[in-house]
Amino acid sequence: MSGPEIWRRWALALPSVVVIMLFSILPLGVVLVYSFLTPGDFGNVKWIFSTEGWFSVLFERNIFDDTISLSDANLTILLRSVLLAIVTTMITLVFGLPTAWFIATRAPAQRNLWLFLITIPFWTNLLVRTIAVQEMIRSEGVFNRILLALGIIDAPIQMMFTDFAVLLGMTYVYLPLMVLPVYAAIEKFDFRLAEASYDLYASRFFCLRRVILPLIRPGVIAGSILVFVPALGAYVTPRIMGGGKSMMLGNLIDLQFGQGRNWPLGAALSIALTVLVLLALIWYTRLTSGRKENDHV
Amino acid sequence: MSKRSFDVTRLPGTAVIAMTCFVILYIPMAILVGYSFNAGKVIGNWEGASVKWYGAALQNQAFLNAALNSLILATTASVISTLFATMAALATTRTEKFRGEGAIHIILNQPLMVPEIVLAIALVIIVGQIKQMTGYTGLGFLIAAHTTFCIPFAYLPIRARLEGMDLSLETAAADLYASRFYTFRRVTLPLLAPGILSGFMLAFVVSLDDLIISDFLKSPGQDTLPTYLMGELKRNLTSEIYAISSLLLLLSVLIVAGSWVATRKKD
């Protein structure tokens, strides 16, 4: 490509590039810098270099005798975030894969209707959907009312503000994100291959495991990453469903910039969360690009 | 051959799980909509059917302001981001690899790789200081932030459309002595229109959906629908909140239905 043509292309991309540099990459750089500063007395930072923010991600210092111990509170939240994100991904896969299969194997006219039904929650405001799940399990909510009316329980069961509530909420809101990419993969699947395997006396399970699953794998991986990444960085759903009792990383970060008044720690946690997400995405590109090479063989 | 006795597309149990899935997805939303028609103020205390909370919402100045803010914000951010994303898509497709193309690609996708709460914190640090220094507290910050995270969403469908487009039509136009601009306006742009439309709609919905970044960056009086709803949720859970939620639900149903009709026509 000639020089002027390259310039022309750069000029076309420039507005987007400048906007993202100014309002996303530059602020992220500031967060990185802040993670190495000293907390101010009333929030904000003092411009004194310190690694205390990063240190506090995993450790805490006893204020009386300066002994160092692992920070149980932060570790619990870190572990909970990763575990809840993984379990959410697994549950959405267990429900999402059969649902995607079901939709993809309908007659075309029917298929669009089912797809439409998955698309509506997908496009519906996340907060509205979280409010809807909250209604199901809050103390005065649907489940407790039904159980009380049936006389199964005497007092409402406290389901809100637990890990279970956060898990339920995240599974509910992220389920459509799993179904759509898996559906796209199954729709492209050539069912003659399954037929061939059955002709060769494969059992249903064998065919599923050795023929179908390997071929729809890219869709499964894409769906998993689409659920895992927002689940790991979730803020709204754990805030409503988990409250102060079942916090995730996003809420811990928010806390440091609010009541916690430890901006460097909040900044370090932000960078740590971003790195975790990037690792997941790199793992994803590795998996899928490996796939493409195999396809050519 | 008569009806096949063995259907390869059938997997035992999938229909049951799929139905469970749809029931689980729709029951909470149905209950939410149901309770929005409750005459009583306390959710769950059914005191007869009524649309009075819809009436109350439509007379609630704070809600109307939030709706107006959301509309202004989503429209502005999605128009700007779609325009920028279209230009960027034209720059990065249908070309041999050029110097810096990889960098442009990473930058365009970068907002997708960062959790929203992190971007919100990052922006609030900078915007807080700009607000202090300049005294400006207008919608500009929100528009800039929304435009930023909308660009990748607008970019993806437009780029996909461009990559699937047939170059021969443009070559034909050029052969017939059409100028570069004329070819773009009369050939490329009409072919690209469905991609631009879906990019715009995606950006619009993503902006409308945003809670975290708006909540962190807003100045007093700049509530959007989600931030207003979140605030009300903390203050008092009444049937009016469910009415407002149902209105938002209706809006997304309309948008989905609208986009389906639009894409059907194009096909």
Image (spheres, coloured by chain):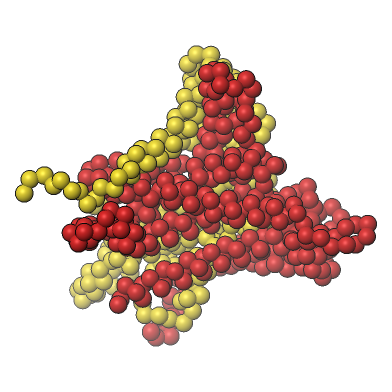
From the viewer's perspective, is B87 left or right of A268? left
Q: Quadrant of residue A207?
A: bottom left
The residue nearer to you, when weighing A70 against A35, is A70
* Image point (44%, 36%), residue name: B24
Quarter of image, res A263: bottom right
| Point 49% across, 79% down: residue | B100
Q: Residue furthest left?
A: B1
* Image-based side of A59 in relation to A136, left or right: right
Residue at point 62%, 53% (across, down): A81
In the image, residue B182 lies at what x, y percent?
29, 68
Left or right? Give the position of A205 relative to A157: left
**As drawn, is A77 to the left or to the right of A122?**
right
Compare residues B225 and A76 and report the one nearer the observer. A76
For the question of whether residue B7 can be seen, the reply is: yes
Where residue A21 appears, x then y in whole percent?
A: 58, 67
Q: Residue B119 at what x, y percent from top left? A: 62, 58
Question: Can you name the residue that lies furthest to the bottom here?
Answer: A2
Q: Is residue B204 above or below residue A266?
A: above
Q: Residue at x 44, y 38 (%)?
A: B25
Report which colour depicts chain A.
red
Q: Position of residue A34 (x, y in %)?
A: 75, 65
Residue A233 visible in image? no
Which shade is chain B? yellow
Q: Extreme top residue here?
A: B48
